[in-house]
Image: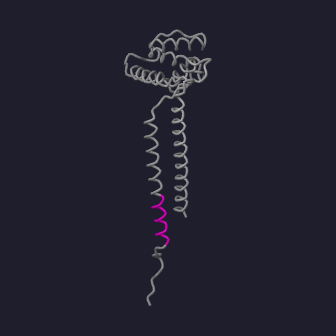
Amino acid sequence: MESLAQLELCQRLYKLHFQLLLLFQSYCKLIGQVHEVSSMPELLNMSRELSDLKKHLKEATAAIAADPLYSEGAWSEPTFTSTEAAIQSMLECLKNNELGKALRQIRECRSLWPNDIFGSSSDDEVQTLLNIYFRHQTLGQTGTYALVGSNQSLTEICTKLMELNMEIRDMIRRAQSYRVLTTFLPDSSVSGTSL
């Protein structure tokens, strides 16, 4: 009875995984359609600008993490009087390529205003800075978009999900065939009779 419940659980897991695969494929198609629409002249594509900024912010994050002299309180940053002043300061840092300073400022703002526009300490600092930058670069504009990421990584993920789905399906089939075999095996507790 227990093996039957385990088999049913595996089948449900397979169905759930297959639905996840379908959802991910739909997401990939949506991203593909957005890329197609990006050629329209009415739209402003900020994808390259934000991708470059993301790359440089990640490098700055790694540099800060590798710097033995850096510690949370080591840099004397002015305490901001408002979120607007903090945002303007961060935007200036991003525009002037002072990325380490922008990262330090977002950390300070998170301690001053937790769970505000600056996010919480568990949120990705780079993504938060990208969101702030994009939001303020596009104020009052319509038709501006940005896709940050790689089509290649989506394709790789989709391929891995499909391979995993096939493996799960094969395991379920083997488990079902094992169940069928054990159903037809003679019970060893029954004594044999001869004719």
Looking at the picture, tell me which residue is in the foreground, 112 or 100.
Answer: 100
Is residue 67 placed above or below 20 in the rendered structure?
A: above
Q: Of all residues shown, which one is farthest toward the front?
A: 41
Looking at the picture, tell me which residue is in the foreground, 90 or 189.
Answer: 90
On the image, the x and y values in percent for residue 103 come to 48, 18
- The residue stretch that appears in magenta: 172-183
Prevailing SS of the magenta stretch:
helix
State the image quarter where residue 194 is shown. bottom left
Looking at the picture, tell me which residue is in the foreground, 71 or 98.
Answer: 98
On the image, the x and y values in percent for residue 192 come to 45, 83
Is residue 176 placed above or below 101 in the rendered structure?
A: below
Q: Is residue 180 magenta?
A: yes
The residue lying at 48 percent from left, 16 percent from top is 104
Q: Is the image coloured rainbow, by chain, by secondary structure, or in one colour?
A: one colour
Quadrant of the image for the C terminus? Answer: bottom left
The residue lying at 48 percent from left, 58 percent from top is 172
Quadrant of the image for the N terminus? Answer: bottom right
Residue 33: tell me if it is visible: yes
On the image, the x and y values in percent for residue 165 come to 47, 50
Total labels drawn: 0
